[in-house]
Amino acid sequence: MFYSPRKLGEWGQHIPDGISLTPFHAESAPVTMGSDVWIGQDVRIRSGVHIATGAIVAAGSIVTRDVEPYAIVGGVLAKVIRYRFEPDLIEKLLASEWWQFSPKDLLPYRTENPEQFLDQFSDAKDTLTPLNLIRLNPRQHIRRK
């Protein structure tokens, strides 16, 4: 029987006699996410999956594949329900890279209408200062016991 070393601790003394245990060490790749992503409650995401910019993952979903930009996915196993915007608008939003700027700088623009926002933003983009974003690796910040 294969087991995860973490699970062995949970089993304690409840392993039946005569069972041969072989440790199983799963390799895991990090889950990566773009900007403007919303993940619902109790979502499970397989290691190595990328959730692209603007995606929405419905509560309770199990995500085993990469999620496309601005897709709304849900279910067990998660599948595309629909897209938040038409393909040409998604392309324009991705090309704008609006998430590279401070939310404070974006407040004056009408974000409830994406087309209007893109028009206003593209006119002012050269006058805005991009954020100095730092990529975090959660594994560097988690203390192991």
Image (tube, rainbow, N blue to C red):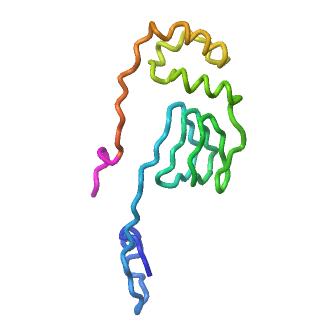
**Quadrant showing the N terminus:** bottom left
Whether residue 61 is in magenta: the answer is: no
Residue 17 at x, y = what percent? 40, 91
Residue 80 at x, y = what percent? 68, 45
Q: Nearer the viewer, residue 115 or 43?
A: 115
Residue 34 at x, y = what percent? 50, 35
**What residue lies at 69% left-to-right and 36% top-to-bottom?**
83
Residue 73 at x, y = what percent? 65, 44
**Quadrant showing the C terminus:** bottom left
Relative side of 144 to 96, left or right: left
Q: Nearer the viewer, residue 10 or 124?
A: 124
**What residue lies at 39% left-to-right and 87% top-to-bottom?**
20
Residue situated furthest bottom in the rendering: 18
Q: Quadrant of residue 84?
A: top right
The tally of labels here is: 0
Relative side of 85 to 15, left or right: right
**What residue lies at 65% left-to-right and 19% top-to-bottom?**
114
**What residue lies at 52% left-to-right and 14% top-to-bottom?**
106
Q: Quadrant of residue 62?
A: bottom right
Q: Which residues are magenta?
A: 139-145
Q: Nearer the viewer, residue 144 or 52?
A: 52
